[in-house]
Image (spheres, rainbow, N blue to C red):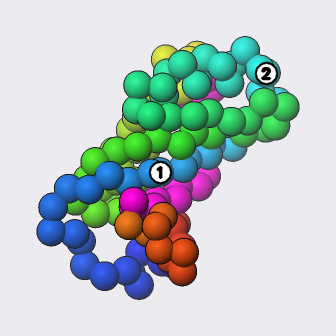
Amino acid sequence: MAYEDMEPETTGPIRWSVSLRADGDREMSLEEIVELADAVAAHGGIASGMGTTSYGAQVLVTADGPRRAAELASALFTEAAAKAGLPAWPIADVHVMSEEMDIAEDDEPVIF
C-alpha cells in the first residue's frame, strides 16, 4: 500500500512497528548483527542480516502517522548502525505498520 493511498494522519500519537533494511557490498557477520541487536534493543528492536549483504532491524516508535514513524525509525536505525560500527549503507526498504493494522488481517504495511 502506498503512503498516498492511506487515510489521513492519525489524530494522536500511536505505536508503530517499523522494519528497515540497508543494502551493501559485503557479507555481515554474526558479531556485527549482535552489535546491531544490542543497539536497537532499547527501542523494542530486533536485528537481522547475518550471512547476507544487508542488515536490518525492526523497531517500535510512537508517532502521529506512518510518514513520521518512518522518519523517526530511520534516524534510530542509522544511529544504531553507527553505534554498532556497521558500514553506513543506504536504507533500501522501510515498512511501517501500526498496532491497529497488525490486528486487522486485511491491512498491509505502508512501504516507503
Numbered label attached to residue 18: 1
Outermost residue to the left: 11
Q: Amino acid at mark 2?
A: Ser
Residue 74 shows in the view: yes
Q: Residue at label 2?
A: 29
Give the vertical position of 36 relative to 44 (above or below).
above
Q: Nearer the viewer, residue 32 or 60?
A: 60
Q: Nearer the viewer, residue 49 or 43?
A: 43
In this image, 35 relative to 24: left or right? left
| SS for dot 2 | loop
**Sequence-wise first label, 2 or 1:** 1
Q: Image point 69% across, 43% down: which residue?
A: 23
Q: Are marks 2 and 1 in contact (CB under 8 Å)?
A: no
Q: Nearer the viewer, residue 15 or 112?
A: 15
Give the vertical position of 93 relative to 32 (above or below).
below
Give the vertical position of 16 relative to 44 (above or below).
below
Magenta residues, start to end: 86-99
Question: Where in the figure is residue 7, as x and y percent of width and height?
Answer: 31, 82
Question: Where in the figure is residue 97, as x and y percent of width and height?
Answer: 45, 61
Q: Image point 55% across, 47% down: which residue?
A: 20
Q: Amino acid at mark 1?
A: Val
Q: CA distance from mark 2 to mark 1?
A: 23 Å
Q: Image point 20% across, 56% down: which residue?
A: 13
Residue 106, quarter of the rendered image: bottom right
